[in-house]
Image (cartoon, rainbow, N blue to C red):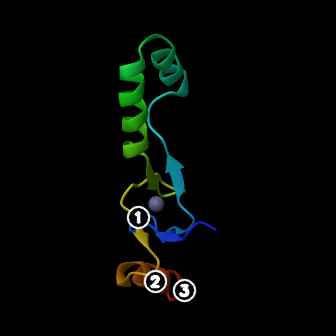
Amino acid sequence: MQQAVACPVCRYVGPPRRVTPGSFLIELVLWLFFIIPGVIYSLWRLSARREVCAACGNPQTVPLSTPAGQAILNQNHNP
Ligand SMILES: [Zn+2]
């Protein structure tokens, strides 16, 4: 179960979308022909992977357990 997040930009509340940069194809080619760049590329993709807002793609989401997340949730319920 993925933890729900709140987005301060569009007030979306729900599970985030996981974004992995780069291309699996490039990773595969690097691994086949050049082992060391393949390792570096894989590590970079993993380290650069992040969770963004599923609605607007904003990477600055806050967990619902934080006061900022609760504030967004309350704003949605009490317009
Ligand atoms: Zn958003």
Q: Earlier in the sequence, mark 2 or mark 1?
A: 1
Mark number displayed over residue 75 = 2
Looking at the image, which residue is at 45% across and 31% down? Answer: 22
The residue type indicated by label 3 comes to His
Residue 1 on image: x %, y %: 64, 68
Residue at 35% x, 29% y: name it: 40
Element carrying mark 3: helix
Query: Within 8 Å of ligand 1, the CB of disc 1?
Result: yes
Residue type at mark 2 is Gln
Distance between the alpha carbons at the discs numbered 3 and 1: 19 Å
| Quarter of the figure with residue 4 | bottom right
Mark 2 CB lies closer than 8 A to ligand 1:
no
Q: CA distance from mark 2 to mark 1?
A: 16 Å
At numbered mark 2, what does the secondary structure look like: helix, strand or loop? helix
Q: Is residue 70 above or below residue 62?
A: below
Residue closer to the observer: 63 or 11: 63
Q: Residue furthest right?
A: 1
Please determine whether, in this image, residue 40 is positioned above or below residue 67.
above
Disc 3 or disc 1, which is closer to the eye? 1
Q: Nearer the viewer, residue 21 or 13?
A: 21
Can you give x and y, in whole percent of width and height, for residue 48 in the image? 37, 43
Residue 61 got which mark? 1
Task: Report the residue at 59% width, 66% height from top.
Answer: 2
Do tag 3 and tag 2 residues touch (Cβ < 8 Å)? yes
Q: Nearer the viewer, mark 2 or mark 1?
A: 1
Mark 3–mark 2 Cα distance, whole angstroms, equals 5 Å
Work out whether mark 3 precedes mark 1 in sequence or the reverse, and give the earlier one.
Answer: 1
Residue under pointer 3: 77
